[in-house]
């Protein structure tokens, strides 16, 4: 801050007698006269505003002296009358104002300041004005002592004069114009001068504050979906997408002349020099499908249940919709760390197929198996004639545990998950995400739990929607919400074509005659699904469902909602009926 401060004067006791000369119209020279000068100041303020720093600023503090501004000591009535009588004539005021404006306009600060009643304050303020605002042209035109300008500035001892200012800046063809006013007075020395006060530079400064030329932040990109359509203002996805990593700020900054009242008040634009630009911010989501996803999740999470949905386009990996409940809180869909239940049997099934089984391989569904922990199914009883495809369609826990313990090593599941489905790799979606956890099992019990999506395995609907999409297309394409992510994760291998074909057949069988039959009824085309019921800490199980229909894959989970075919299955089917029409 650059500051200017006037001299300070010592006060002495005085009486009315010291003003007797003023009653006769004579110039007062007693200590009481000197005492009228009180502290005043002009400060130049340079600081950040409107979110980004800028060119500079000047601040003009209220100057109050001689009782001519607010806060001055009251004068005796006879002195005020004498001062008013000493006001310059209109011609004298016009001459003084023109001289001041001419000097100020041509940049002769010293000459302009000398034509005021406070050259010390005027010099600093006028210099800072030039240095900080950097006008390329500055024209000041007297407008005379007429109309509202004269009425506003008419005070005892002053003659009001108006002026018109026109200022141009490099880099823009716009000109800033405003009307100002001056008060012209007779000084103690008997000369006619412009009375210096903050409003000399700009009338708004009479109220305090500072003026600056600042860069103005680029407008936030207009958020649109993959088709260029805006999202509903009420959609919670807009807040979620505020954290999207775009690799740079869209749009270009602008410049403006602004008035600042202080840190606690927003800056006010007085004049726009260049408009900030806004870029269209396009994401992969589909606004119509997003509405359907939000409605479906809202319908199944009534009563305060948590849940999430992600819809992915298998052919591209584009995230088409995402929703979490409760809305407006944690992004459970991307950041959740929860057991996926039997939806994990898609990955376990891939590992068993790679180990040499096929959908028609015998795999008895026993009522109980031991690891040594005893494991059961939702529906009790033996189904000893089941094949692997039957076990998958009816979600037989015991068969997957028995076959997994016999055919797979302790680290096989994590290896297949990473190499064929991209799970556990470092994903770069454009939003912060949790990328799966499939820890090495420490015991046969832990190994058994992982084969059915329990134990220490942690997933979310983003990951499991990708699993469904990988089966549908036969290729892992890491999901993204912004197209063109350069560091998108790629699986070290890929889902073998034969395994992808067999998984699609087993997921289709689950829709036709298995646990997904009820919610998926009536859906035509290429369809597949897998239900999941994840038990967590002995509470009511979480409902899970992953599925695809054509070029749309979806994963849904609803906390504490029971079997996967119920809440999660209903929501998934509702979304698949809307379909992918992009």
Image: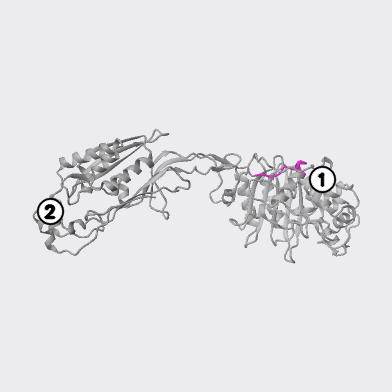
Please identify, in this view, whether the residue under mark 1 or under mark 2 is nearer the observer: 2
Of 387 and 134, nearer the camera is 134
| Residue 276 horizontal side relative to residue 73, left or right | right
* 241 vs 109: above or below: below
Work out whether mark 1 precedes mark 2 in sequence or the reverse, and give the earlier one. Answer: 2
Question: Is residue 401 in view?
Answer: yes
Q: Dot 1: what SS?
A: helix
Residue 73 coordinates in the image, percent (x, y): 22, 60
Residue 128 coordinates in the image, percent (x, y): 35, 44
C-alpha gap between disc 1 and disc 2: 106 Å
* 373 vs 116: above or below: below
Query: What residue is disc 2 on?
Result: 82
Q: Report which quarter residue 484 is drawn in.
A: top right
Q: Which is the main secondary structure of the residues drawn in magenta?
A: loop
Residue 293 coordinates in the image, percent (x, y): 64, 50
Callout 2 crowding tier (Cα within 10 Å): few <14, some 14–19, many ≥20: some
CB under 8 Å between discs 1 and 2: no
Of 318 and 269, nearer the camera is 269
Residue 544 coordinates in the image, percent (x, y): 73, 56
- Number of numbered discs: 2
- Residue at figure coordinates x 48%, y 44% from the top left: 217
Query: What residue is disc 1 on?
Result: 505
Question: Any magenta on residue 203?
Answer: no
- Residue at figure coordinates x 40%, y 40% from the top left: 272
Which residue is situated farthest in the top direction here?
Answer: 173
Q: Dot 2: what SS?
A: helix
Of 498 and 525, nearer the camera is 498
Q: Which residues are magenta?
A: 471-480
């Amino acid at each position: 801050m650059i500051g200017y401060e006037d001299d300070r004067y010592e006060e002495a006791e005085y009486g009315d007698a010291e003003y007797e000369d003023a009653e006769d119209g004579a110039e007062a020279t007693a200590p009481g006269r000197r005492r009228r000068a009180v502290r005043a100041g002009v400060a130049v303020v340079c600081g950040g505003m409107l979110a980004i720093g800028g060119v500079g600023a000047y601040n003009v503090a209220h100057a109050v002296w001689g009782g001519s501004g607010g806060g001055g000591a009251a004068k005796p009535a006879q002195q005020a009358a004498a001062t008013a009588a000493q006001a310059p004539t209109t011609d004298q005021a016009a001459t003084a104002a023109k001289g001041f404006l001419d000097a100020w306009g041509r940049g002769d600060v010293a000459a302009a300041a000398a034509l005021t009643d406070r050259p010390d304050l005027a010099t600093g303020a006028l210099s800072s004005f030039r240095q900080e605002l950097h006008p390329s042209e500055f024209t000041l035109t007297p407008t005379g002592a007429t109309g509202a300008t004269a009425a506003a500035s008419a005070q005892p001892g002053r003659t009001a004069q108006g002026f018109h200012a026109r200022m141009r800046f490099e880099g823009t063809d716009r000109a800033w114009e405003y009307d100002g006013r001056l008060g012209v007075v007779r000084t103690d020395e008997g000369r006619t001068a412009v009375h210096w006060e903050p409003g000399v530079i700009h009338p708004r400064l009479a109220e305090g504050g500072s003026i600056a030329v600042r860069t103005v932040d680029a407008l936030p990109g207009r958020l649109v979906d993959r088709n260029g359509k805006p999202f509903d203002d009420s959609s919670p996805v807009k807040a979620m997408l505020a954290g999207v990593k775009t690799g740079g700020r869209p749009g270009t900054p602008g410049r403006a002349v602004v008035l600042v009242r202080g840190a606690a008040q927003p800056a006010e634009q007085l004049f726009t020099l260049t408009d900030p630009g806004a870029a269209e911010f396009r994401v992969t989501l589909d606004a119509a499908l997003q509405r359907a996803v939000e409605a479906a999740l809202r319908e199944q999470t009534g009563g305060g249940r948590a849940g999430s949905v992600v819809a992915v386009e298998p052919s591209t990996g584009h995230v088409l919709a995402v929703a979490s409940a409760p809305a407006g809180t944690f992004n459970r869909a991307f950041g959740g760390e929860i057991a996926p239940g039997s939806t994990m049997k898609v990955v376990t099934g891939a590992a068993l197929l790679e180990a040499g089984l096929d959908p028609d391989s015998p795999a008895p569904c026993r009522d109980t198996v031991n690891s040594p922990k005893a494991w059961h199914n939702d529906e009790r009883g033996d189904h000893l004639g089941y094949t692997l495809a039957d076990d998958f369609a009816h979600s037989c826990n015991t068969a997957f545990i028995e076959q997994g313990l016999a055919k797979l090593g302790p680290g096989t599941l994590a290896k297949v998950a990473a190499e064929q489905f991209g799970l556990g790799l470092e994903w770069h979606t454009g939003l912060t995400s949790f990328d799966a956890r499939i820890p090495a099992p420490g015991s046969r019990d832990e190994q058994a739990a992982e084969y059915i999506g329990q134990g220490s395995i942690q997933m979310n609907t983003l990951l499991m929607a990708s699993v469904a999409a990988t089966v549908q297309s036969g290729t892992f394409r890491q999901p993204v919400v912004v197209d063109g992510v350069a560091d998108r994760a790629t699986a070290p291998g890929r889902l073998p074509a034969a395994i992808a074909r067999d998984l699609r057949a087993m997921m289709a069988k689950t829709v036709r005659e298995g646990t997904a039959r009820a919610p998926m009824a009536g859906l035509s085309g290429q369809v597949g699904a897998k239900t999941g019921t994840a038990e967590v800490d002995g509470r009511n199980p979480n409902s899970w469902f992953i599925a695809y229909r054509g070029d749309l894959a979806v994963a849904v989970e609803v906390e504490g909602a029971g079997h996967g075919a119920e809440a999660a299955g209903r929501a998934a089917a509702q979304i698949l009926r809307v379909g992918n029409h992009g």
